[in-house]
Image (cartoon, rainbow, N blue to C red):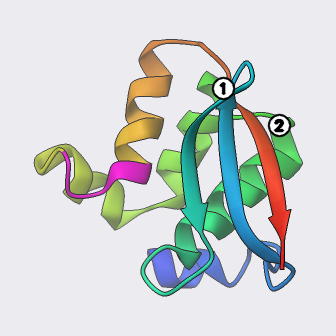
């Protein structure tokens, strides 16, 4: 499956304006529900629904959900920061809490 094909199988995110990722009380990432980032919001939201946080197991599944974009991110570090974050999380199991920001 391609990333586009995978996205349609994930839960809708129309109710979300953004997702914030927290390490303790500190916000370490924010993904806006806007063009260019909406796919990542959908992936991270699905991971949060399944795992309750973004940890190494969730990150591993997320990399599979990103399909061909994961390969591109591995070949070009920095090009896909939301995928880069998941790659790093598979190596260091410091779970991130998720805060859903409603529309």
> Which disc number belongs to residue 51?
2
Residue 1 shows in this picture: no
Bounds of the magenta span? Answer: 78-82
Residue shown at 60% from the left, 14% from the top: 94
* Viewer-side residue, 47 vs 79: 79
Horizontal and vertical percent position of residue 12: 81, 80
Q: Are marks 1 and 2 in contact (CB under 8 Å)?
A: yes
Image position of 46 with respect to 7: above or below: above
* Viewer-side residue, 46 vs 96: 96
Which element type, helix, strand or loop, lies under badge 1?
loop
Distance Cα–Cα, label 1 vs label 2? 8 Å
Image position of 57 with respect to 39: above or below: above
> How many numbered marks appear?
2
Horizontal and vertical percent position of residue 95: 67, 21
Image position of 76 with respect to 92: above or below: below
> Which disc number belongs to residue 36?
none
Horizontal and vertical percent position of residue 52: 87, 36
Residue 49 shows in this picture: yes
Is residue 22 toward the left or the right of residue 16 in the image?
Answer: left
Q: Which residue is mark 1?
A: 55
* Viewer-side residue, 60 vs 29: 29
Horizontal and vertical percent position of residue 92: 48, 12
Is residue 94 toward the left or the right of residue 18 in the image?
Answer: left
Indicate yes or no whether the magenta region holds residue 22: no
């Amino acid at each position: 499956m391609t990333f586009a094909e995978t996205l349609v199988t994930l839960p809708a995110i129309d109710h979300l304006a953004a997702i914030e990722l927290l390490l303790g009380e500190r916000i370490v990432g924010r993904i806006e529900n806007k063009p260019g980032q909406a796919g990542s919001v959908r992936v991270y939201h699905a991971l949060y629904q399944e795992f309750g946080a973004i940890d190494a197991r969730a990150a591993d599944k997320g990399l599979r959900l990103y399909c061909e974009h994961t390969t591109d991110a591995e070949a070009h570090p920095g090009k896909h920061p939301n995928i880069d974050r998941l790659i790093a999380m598979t190596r260091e199991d410091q779970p991130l809490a998720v805060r859903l920001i409603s529309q």
